[in-house]
Image: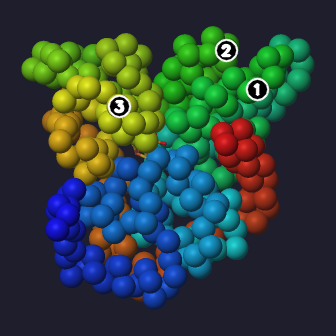
């Protein structure tokens, strides 16, 4: 008899119900890496914003049930508008998306032109609303931002929205001058140079892996700065047995499941021993089961906004293939 690489998975009654409903409704369940482990366990795909956008675009399921935050489910609806897209809690937002209201961006673009008199070339991080995507030339994620910016014609002046930290990291990698929108992720900016220095002193041999939404003093301490999906690849390929992870807590669940023989240490913030995104954690197994029962809450978009938001997303998906 062959030995199983990992113990067989056992599901709770609620998880069993979710798996049954998923089949009955012909639903695909997409979960972001920051979701709690019990949700990741029942998902069809667990990944970063980029990977999940491709899965949403490609699926032939009738329903897309998105366990993540609102802009992610909205993106799924924009790239695959004929599907019913469901998010278990419509109020699961994102501080970065909130930091750039579409009307403020429109006003900025009306008042500010590039030095050569042309429009600014707007690169928006996927953590933004459909209204902001509709005003953007191309979208990026943390997984492809460097490649996307490298593809933009050299004679165009760039506005990077809404995450200043990610934008500055991309600038460091590409050398490309940019203007920045002054937004941030409330959670990632809570990691500090002091909180990381303290955990490094306790685990001096463990590489620090940080998300580019972290501030520069944290990024400078990190051995690797990358998207959540690339964190899995980095930790798998590295010979190190233990890693300090400076991002949201759900990521550690994904890493521990994929790489059970390695140790993952949550980087503390100044406020807390481990970092939970309060928006991601609004999605629970109970809400997921209820949304599969009812097909609600559904993502409903203004068709005109959705139509205008599609080209910037399609450009990203095409440039990242
Ligand atoms: P990733 O695309 O790297 O998963 O990041 C999404 C996010 O919201 C990070 O805070
Ligand atoms: Fe938004 Fe930050 Fe939560 Fe990511 S971790 S979803 S950027 S608030």
Single out the residue that lies furthest toward the front: 1
The image's mark for residue 182 is: none
Identify the element where label 1 is drawn: loop
Estimate the x, y position of residue 165 in percent, counting from the top left.
49, 24
Mark 2 — residue? 176
Say which of 289 and 279 sits in front: 289
Q: Earlier in the sequence, mark 3 or mark 2?
A: 2
Identify the element where label 3 is drawn: helix
Mark 3 — residue? 237
Name the quadrant of the N terminus.
bottom left
Q: Is residue 136 visible to us here?
A: no
Estimate the x, y position of residue 91 in percent, counting from the top left.
44, 62
Circles 1 and 2 in contact, beta carbons < 8 Å: yes
Say which of 20 and 199 sits in front: 20
Estimate the x, y position of residue 61 in percent, counting from the top left.
58, 75
**Distance from label 3 to label 2 (Cα)?**
29 Å
| Horizontal side of residue 103 vs 27, given as left or right | right
| Horizontal side of residue 93 vs 192, given as left or right | right
Ligand 1 shown in quarter: top left
Q: Earlier in the sequence, mark 1 or mark 2?
A: 1
Numbered circles on residues, count: 3
Mark 1 — residue? 152
Instruction: Name which residue lies at 67% across and 42% down.
Output: 321
* Disc 2 residue crowd, few under 14, some 14–19, many 20+, Cα 10 Å: some
Query: Of circles 3 and 2, which is in front?
Result: 3
Q: Is residue 51 visible to us here?
A: yes
Instruction: Name which residue lies at 29% across and 48% down.
Output: 258
């Amino acid at each position: 008899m062959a030995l199983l690489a990992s113990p067989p998975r056992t599901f709770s009654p609620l998880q069993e119900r979710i798996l049954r409903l998923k089949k009955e409704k012909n639903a695909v369940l997409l979960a972001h890496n920051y979701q709690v482990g019990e949700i990741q366990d029942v998902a069809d795909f667990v990944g970063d914003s980029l990977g999940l956008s491709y899965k949403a675009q490609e699926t032939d399921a009738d329903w897309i049930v998105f366990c993540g935050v609102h802009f992610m489910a909205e993106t799924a609806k924009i790239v695959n508008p004929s599907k019913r897209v469901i998010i278990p809690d419509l109020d699961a937002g994102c501080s970065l998306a909130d930091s750039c209201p579409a009307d403020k961006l429109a006003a900025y673009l009306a008042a500010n032109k590039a030095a050569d008199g042309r429009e600014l070339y707007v690169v928006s991080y996927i953590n933004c609303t459909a209204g902001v995507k509709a005003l953007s030339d191309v979208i990026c994620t943390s997984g492809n931002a460097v490649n996307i910016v490298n593809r933009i014609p050299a004679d165009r002046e760039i506005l990077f929205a809404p995450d200043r930290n990610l934008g500055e990291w991309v600038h460091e990698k590409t050398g490309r001058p940019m203007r920045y929108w002054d937004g941030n992720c409330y959670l990632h900016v809570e990691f500090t140079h002091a909180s990381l220095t303290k955990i490094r002193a306790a685990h001096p041999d463990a590489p620090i892996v940080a998300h580019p939404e972290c501030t520069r003093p944290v990024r400078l301490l990190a051995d690797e700065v990358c998207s959540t999906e690339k964190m899995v690849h980095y930790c798998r390929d590295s010979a190190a047995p233990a890693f300090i992870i400076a991002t949201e807590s759900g990521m550690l669940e994904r890493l521990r499941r994929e790489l059970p023989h390695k140790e993952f240490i949550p980087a503390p913030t100044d406020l807390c021993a481990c970092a939970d995104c309060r928006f991601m954690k609004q999605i629970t197994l109970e809400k997921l089961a209820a949304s599969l029962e009812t097909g609600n809450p559904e993502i409903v978009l203004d068709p005109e906004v959705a139509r205008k938001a599609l080209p910037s997303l399609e450009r990203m998906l095409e440039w990242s293939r």
